[in-house]
Image (cartoon, rainbow, N blue to C red):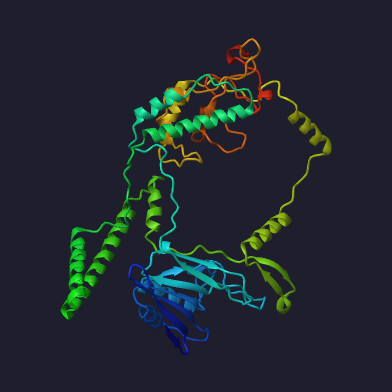
Amino acid sequence: MRCTSNDSHQSVEVSVSLQNGRHINIVAIYCPPQAIWSGQDFNNLLTSLGDAFIVGGDWNAKSQWWGNARSCLRGRTLVNSILQVNCNILATGSPTHYPFNSRQTPSAIDFALFKGIRRELLAITDSFELSSDHLPLQVQLVEKPTTNNAKGHLLHLNANINKFQSYLNDKILLNTEINSADDVDDAVNIFVKNIEDAANYANPQNPRKLTRTRFRVNRQTLLLIEARKQIKRYLLRNRNPLAKQLYNRLSNRIRKELIVARQMYEEELFKSIDPTDRYSMQKLWRLTNEIKRQPAPNLPLLKSSSGNGSNAHNVWCKTTAEKVETFAASLEQRFHPIVTTSPSDLAEIEAQVSQPSVTPSVLFRPVTAAEVISHISTLENKKAAGLDQIDNHTIKALPMKAILSYPDPPRNSNGNRRNNDPPIDLAAHTPASGVAQNIGDAAALHSRLPIFQELAPSPPTTASMRPPVINLDDLPD
């Protein structure tokens, strides 16, 4: 442990040894507001902490980089030093200092800087337990990163399409009987489950994993890295000063080569972006990953205010729950329902809406299977999938039997289909939960209409309010 106390700052440094043999310096720091810091002072402080460190505390510096609305001179100076030393910011993005003087605005001046540690291994949280004007911050260093396993394609690009289609042809039934709206939901769930099982059956057992690197290292740099490993092993055995000198020279050379490779990689990404193609603009996301990430700002909300001028008394929201309640109350005060309809008109509208519709309000021409297949062929593969993970690539691979799949509506006592019950297409149905769980998410409304159905039922999930089937050819011109 090493303690430092002078006019510019106060700090306590502790060196921690990890299981893999690495050493990390953890430093708690306080920088008084009256001290004057230069860029060289910050550079000397950060470089003295070594190659792997976490330094956090009260910096009394404001910048948009860690959640403030404005920057101060010390904040701008510290940002320049962060870029020069190549360390990273670890902050909550929310205010950490709530002054006792209610006329002052909360600010984010407590945060941490780190270097030589993966960002996925660190987590920072704030606490509201103490009565201080500063919120205590807790930095957690984990052994393994907590990553979210993102779902990939339901049907892999190298899947066996023949196996996928044959599985669906064996599992899908075209005579499913429907007696209620719940049966429709069950049929849709079974339909989606069959698609998922078919995709798992057709996908390869050991799919290839695409590894994305930030930039490609050329062969010369790889040879330098291998030479440095050999020199390091020799240095650990013999402790030769010449080997130490050669090791440092190789490290500096590799660092410069990696900087050049990174710059060339970013230039290639910029050149490959086509402003006229919206899908090529998605490469900007990959490019932004190369830029130093900043914590998302979470500016404070004023909960209440009373008085004017020197007598003003402000109460600021600290927790997320307080911010939500304050924002909701502000919306309730700002927006009010505008009632311009008389009670008699409202009663007439409610009566018209509640009574069953005798004649269809909107007529659609019959939709053929060829039109549905033609529309599916025009779907773009780079569209994101819905909650069911059925993307356009999977939709295009569906066999004809899956496209024509529709359950059998209820029949009368004679076994015949009732005249007012047209076929129901599974691809055009949305469950009663309101969450789309079928392949109709990516298609337009006209292509989601039941095949061979001559009008759209209104509403589609209520069997008792289905309009009668009308042949468009019999209608007068």
Q: Nearer the viewer, residue 195 or 455?
A: 195
Q: Residue at x 49, y 68 (%)?
A: 91
Q: Nearer the viewer, residue 24 or 345?
A: 24
Above-or-below relation of 152 to 63: above
Question: Can residue 319 be spotted in the picture?
Answer: yes
Q: Quadrant of residue 215?
A: bottom left
Q: Quadrant of residue 353?
A: top right
Quadrant where the image shows the C terminus: top right
Q: How many marks?
A: 0
Question: Can residue 445 be spotted in the picture?
Answer: no
Residue 40 rendering spot, x and y as whole percentages: 38, 82
Above-or-below relation of 363 to 433: above
Q: Quadrant of residue 232?
A: bottom left
- Which residue sits furthest bottom? 7
Residue 274 rendering spot, x and y as whole percentages: 36, 48
409 on left or right of 39? right
Q: Residue at x 78, y 30 (%)?
A: 351
Q: Residue at x 66, y 21 (%)?
A: 467
Residue 106 rendering spot, x and y as whole percentages: 60, 72
139 on left or right of 24? right
Residue 8 rendering spot, x and y as whole percentages: 46, 87
- Which residue sits furthest front? 19
Quadrant where the image shows the N terminus: bottom left
63 on left or right of 338? left
- Which residue sits furthest right? 344
